[in-house]
Amino acid sequence: MNLDTVLAISPIDGRYANKCSELQEVFSEFGLIRRRVLVECAWLKALADEPGVAECKLSAAQRKAVDGVVSGFSVEDARRVKEIEKTTNHDVKAVEYFLKEKIGQNEFVHFGCTSEDINNMAHALMLRDGKKVLRGAMDSMTDKIAEMAKAYAKVPMLAHTHGQPASPTTVGKELAVVSRRLKRQAAEMDRLVMPAKMNGAVGNFNAHLSAYPKVDWEKLSRKVIESLGLRQNRLTTQIESHDGIAELFDAMCRWNSVLLDFDRDVWMYVSMGYFKQRTVKGEIGSSTMPHKVNPIDFENSEGNLGLANAVLGFMARKLAVSRMQRDLTDSTTLRNMGVGFGYTLVAIRSTEKGLGKLELNEERLAADLDANWEVLAEPIQTVMRKVGMDHPYERLKELTRGRRVNAEIMRDFVKGLPLPDGDKKRLLAMTPSNYIGIAAKLAKLA
């Protein structure tokens, strides 16, 4: 049956379903079963190609049937597996019986495997494929931030440290910081190749060697694992230890935290008037206040990132822990991988949508800079230090701390200082708008 989105318990499958639909094929029950079938078939073909396993043979017709099951796997096929599972009460055994239905009775289907051999590889493939979806969305949004950084490289902006006016920067440079942070964490995600195992009930190839003691089972296992784009973990219990999954989820959490930080900053900049938001015809900001244009996309993203990190963070901590050679808590936990990915993808798309509505308010930026001439206390006292004047910090503190000063006050102070002509001329030409250091240059590094 097709689930009506208004009946969905999770907003990932309901309200936000159209924002993360690419993940349905990856993290759904269909996606898991499809990848289990892929792994089982890859193992069967490897056994058939192994000279030391003489009894396992596949005719050309049988091999074609095996390949056809993988390439043509459908939702109906997944439903058939679920039907079989009603009898077996075991999801991986149901896949084995399904394959025997499809390609004929063959006892080398699932030969020597424990269920976790199939599951850990299927999960690794889901994560690999899910990561591709996320990374595409991450790069698209990061590229937009980088484009904005370059476009606004020279636009001066009053910085705020501890929420108070601070030395000026540029809009572009602050956006470049975010772009570079996101790229760094994305590179950590890219670095990870998911580990996998296919070594039997407790990781020692016990059953395999009992039947074929002369076969190099580690080599054969590695061949199958690497053929699917994964890397072999040689030392495991019954389960692959999930440390690689924890590393991926932690990297995702860090990326998400950078984006959440950005969402909050943009929210503040909108509140301060540094950015305006384009109105969208038909949209309503408040049910009672018609004038409002709320930064809802950034708020939506922030909330969904919090949910994503709660799920991913829990899983990263939980999955690294298993009683002795295994318990089943990892299995039920892993079924929620798509939740963390889904909330992350929804958040990314909300932020990207919000970015598309922003308009820089250069008049407001300029007005804020002109209202805060006290920020030039920093360069003035620095030059005073250079030439050896007494108590420069304290003198500027007395002039500026806790009060607003204007251009006239600051320039009169500079004029009264016994400074070399070059230094005095440079300070008198300085304004909050041009006191930006190399910010414009740094913005190009986005």
Image (cartoon, helix red, strand yellow):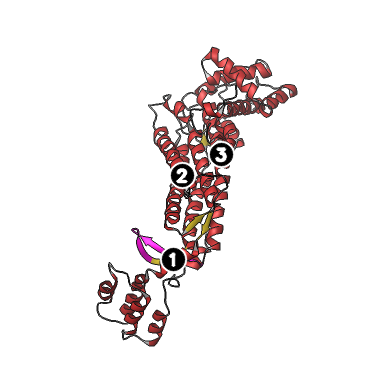
Image disc number at residue 19: 3
Question: Can residue 210 be seen in the rendering of this structure?
Answer: no
Give the residue type that dot 3 points to: Lys
**Amino acid beneath label 2:** Ser
Nearest to the eye among marks 2 and 3: give it.
Answer: 2
Magenta region, main secondary structure:
strand
**What separation in Å lies between label 1 and label 3 (alpha carbons)?**
35 Å
Q: Position of residue 110 (x, y in %)?
A: 58, 21
Dot 2 or dot 3: first in sequence order is 3
| Residue drawn at (63%, 26%) of the image | 41
Q: Is residue 243 visible?
A: yes
Q: Position of residue 86 (x, y in %)?
A: 54, 14
The magenta region covers: 153-166
Question: Along the line of sight, which residue is nearer the eye, 222 or 172?
Answer: 172
Q: Element under label 1? A: strand
Pointer 1 or 2: first along the chain: 1
Amino acid type, residue under disc 1 in the picture: Thr
Question: For residue 30, which numbered disc appears in the image?
Answer: none
Q: Secondary structure at mark 3?
A: helix
Question: What x and y, as percent, mark residue 275?
Answer: 48, 57
For label 2, the SS is loop
The vertical placement of 2 against 186, above or below, is above
- Viewer-nearest of discs 1 and 2: 2
Circles 2 and 3 in contact, beta carbons < 8 Å: no
Q: Residues within 10 Å of mark 2 (few under 14, many from 20)?
A: few
Name the residue tied to disc 2. Answer: 286
Distance, label 2 to label 3, CA atoms, is 24 Å
